[in-house]
Image (tube, helix red, strand yellow):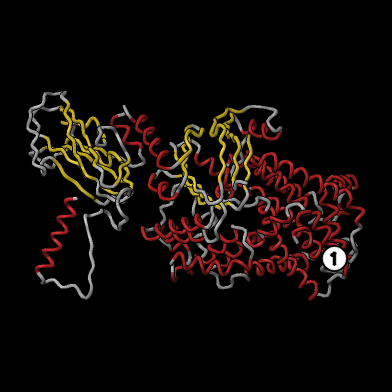
Amino acid sequence: MPLISIRNITKKYHTFDSDWHRFLEAITNGRIRRRHEHWILKGISLDAEAGESIGIIGYNGAGKSTLLKIVLGVSTPDTGSVEINGRVAGLLELGVGFHPEFTGRENAVISCQLLGLAPEEIPPLVEEIKEFSELGEYFDEPMRTYSTGMAMRLAFSSSTVVRPEILVVDEALAVGDAYFQHKSMARIRRFREAGTTLFLVSHDPTAIKNLCDRAIILEDGVMIRDGRPDEVLDYYQAMVNRRKKDEEIRQFQGDGVVTTRSGDARMEISAIQVLDMDGKPGRVFKTGETARIRQTITCNDPDVRPNVGIMIRDRLGNHIYGTNTHLKKVAIHDRFEVGTQFHVDFDVQLLLGGGSYNVSVAVVDDALHSSHLDWIDQAVVFQVMPDGVPDFAGLTPLPASLSYGLGPGTVEEPERQAASQMSDKVAAGD
Amino acid sequence: MSAVFAKVPFAAPLWQYRAFIWSAATREMRLQSMNSVLGWLWPVLNAVALILLYMTLFVEVLKSRLPGSDDSMSYAIYLCIGIINWTYFSNTILRSLNIFGENAMLLKKAGFPKITLPVVVVISQGVQFAIMMAVFAALLIVTGRIPGWALLGMIPLLIIQQTIAISLGILLGTLNVFFRDVGQAVGIILTFWFWLTPIVYPMSILSPAVASFVTTWNPLTRIIVGYHDITLNNTMPDMTNFIGHIVLALVLSGLAYFCFKRLYSAVQDYL
């Protein structure tokens, strides 16, 4: 018997011209109809076994959250059946039911109570929450004194203190600092190993790849793909590319990052593309792959000598790498007529860890650096998946090798140095 | 244990979530007692102040007497028992009105049994009621006016009264999600209801026509009169007078349940 069995469920949201209509229809059980219908889910069927973890991807408004809510039981489908044989816990929002005046401990207790735990079960769990959240003395301070990160840590620790049979997680898994993020991921992974079925909605392909053994795509309330995560993610990638193909610059502004644009427009960036080495548009790269960042620039002033540049930043805004035609000593000194388009390609080998990165692009006056012609911050976002390289810590997989030997290592021995250089050469020759 | 629960409606989820119910019911009082020196004493002090005020005002200053009574304190007792019970009744209704709005986040984002919410209202108001009653009873003991076993007669009356209150509360609270007007109207209606109930005045001052109207159409009249008989005359209420009330309470709770079940899905999408 599957743990979750969803059969052909549909969900419509209704809008009404007046609340009176809404009431009339609800009280007559729909015999009187006054609604305008919006379909959210159009017949979804899904079985999940214990221990399966399912990633759900799709555009905004595809019905992902609604599906999660139905599994969690806080929304009811209009037709179809949902059968759930286990306790469901949700991480749709962290810290529901918390009050800022209560201490961390009191809020942890409230959270346990909301899980339906008996009074005698709660005290040992609260100690566990204290330990996991690592709040120390703050645990007994009112929550209003907490930083956002601390509040999130408490919330995550509390809502996951008991392993549920089914765990429903929406997007914001990014809890607290990187260390705690890792810790919470590890806890979810442990749940999974112990047999928890996981539902994860995310826009982050890395998270789905890391945590899920099955992925589905929802589009417009229909499940259009169900399979292994890598296959499904590839398909999704293709979908995204197809959809974004001809949208030029505006396409890059809908990625959930705020794009700011400045400049006097004597030269104008008319398109930005991220291409893979086959010349096809791509948004997801593996660590070590090369991406081509292409800017197409329109000349509005023939006398300008442009300096074209890029800056890659990580999700937190750290500068990872930046360069421009001036630094690369590629002088673009052609005289372009007004209206001429030309393009500049930056081929960058992405020696980067998994995550989301954004690129800012700019054209400035080569003679006068402070004069922006066109400058677009966070113009385009791409993802890197840590694939094909061994796991590592930090931002970038620097080429590194290691060896070990008996006794304390010595540095003065010339033979040894020569030997290690030799081995480097051999490695490079591979 | 579970075999018993299987038969009583809602017993299983209510028992499982007992810790949550109690903590939610006392949440407001706990918040109020925070950072205050006297903390939990404040609700008690409030009750003492109110009852002492009635006592001194009506006994000492206005020298009000119930018609046909020699006891100088009888009117104050009459007034107190009426007001304490009315407050429990009307506050239960008023607090139920926003039950969904106040708990919207919980209902939307956390899966937990909805049936706990009205129970939380009854219990949180019940705690306030218990404090008032305790202070009031202490005063009756001190002044040697505590009635005997008849006091137990309050229990069935309270059950009927609160079943009516919470059923009305759920009904009106559900409607209030769709029509905010309901909340406004209830405030006005409760004011009229208060004055149509013999709480401040004795029944004997009403003309026979008004008295019979109030007794027939206002279910609270007999209940409040019952409390008066218990506290002032030490007589048990005659439950045969309350058969109509029991029917009303059952019909109302059935209606509330039906309405809640029908409308809840719409409420959920509306929140």
Q: Does residue B48 sit above or below A389 in this rendering?
A: below
Say whether residue A371 is left or right of residue B92. Answer: left
Residue A157: percent from the left, percent from the top? 48, 61
In the image shown, does B168 or A22 lie closer to the viewer?
A: A22
| Residue A184 falls in image quadrant | bottom left
Taking the image as drawn, is residue A57 in sight?
Answer: yes
Residue under numbered circle 1:
B152
Say whether residue B89 is left or right of residue A198. Answer: right
Taking the image as drawn, is residue B179 in sight?
Answer: no
Residue A408: percent from the left, percent from the top? 20, 75
In the image shown, does A145 or B216 lie closer to the viewer?
A: A145
Residue found at x 22% / y 59%: A401
Label 1 chain ID? B
Amino acid type of the residue that numbered disc 1 sits on in the rendered structure: Leu
Task: Give neighbour class at mark 1: few <14, some 14-19, many 20+ (Cα, 10 Å).
Answer: few
Residue found at x 59% / y 30%: A16
The mark tally for this picture is 1
Say whether residue A394 is left or right of residue A160. Answer: left
| Residue A366 falls in image quadrant | top left
In the image shown, does A383 or A107 lie closer to the viewer?
A: A383
Q: Does residue A129 sit above or below A41 in this rendering?
A: below
**SS at mark 1 in the image:** helix
Residue A104: percent from the left, percent from the top? 49, 65
| Residue B185 falls in image quadrant | top right
Residue A211: percent from the left, percent from the top? 44, 50
